Image (cartoon, rainbow, N blue to C red):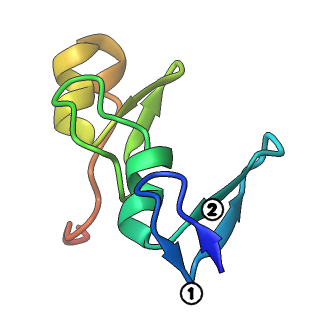
Amino acid sequence: MAVCEVCGNDYYLSFDVNTVGGSVHTFDSFECAIQRLAPVCEHCQVRIVGHGVEISGHFYCGAHCARAMDSQRGDQIRDTVGAHPG
């Protein structure tokens, strides 16, 4: 068993997440992992759980927020989830 670094729960099904930077984090749930590791949209402040978008090192939950914060570069971003081709 290991202790979750977010909530402190000592849980037999806890798991580790290894980051690209070499850090190792221990969590008891995906909820705690998301709380600690997911980036925050720089426009609306929600946790980015899906793909999100990045413009010049800035993270946004989607194209709408990217356009709101950086209209010039944001105009190049398109959300494609659920989009119908042609």
Q: Quadrant of residue 60?
A: top left
> What is the three-letter code of the residue carrying label 2?
Thr
Residue wearing tag 2 = 26
Q: Quadrant of residue 34?
A: bottom left
Taking depth in this image into account, of 39 and 33 the one nearest to the observer is 33
Taking depth in this image into account, of 20 and 50 the one nearest to the observer is 20
Q: What is the count of numbered marks? A: 2
Mark drawn on residue 13: 1
Rounded to the nearest angstrom, the CA distance separating label 2 from label 1 is: 11 Å
- Give coordinates of residue 49: x percent, y percent: 36, 57
- Image side of residue 36 versus residue 25, left or right: left
Taking depth in this image into account, of 51 and 76 the one nearest to the observer is 51
Q: Is residue 38 above or below residue 32?
A: above
As helix, strand or loop, the secondary structure at mark 1 comes to loop
Residue drawn at x 40%, y 57% is 7
Residue drawn at x 40%, y 40% is 53
- Image side of residue 83 versus residue 31, left or right: left
Q: Is residue 27 above or below residue 79?
A: below
Residue drawn at x 46%, y 33% is 54
Indicate which disc, 2 or 1, sits on the residue closer to the N terminus: 1
Residue drawn at x 45%, y 52% is 6
> What is the three-letter code of the residue carrying label 1?
Leu
Q: Is residue 6 above or below residue 15?
A: above
As helix, strand or loop, the secondary structure at mark 2 comes to strand
- Give coordinates of residue 62: x percent, y percent: 26, 43
- Give coordinates of residue 69: x percent, y percent: 23, 15
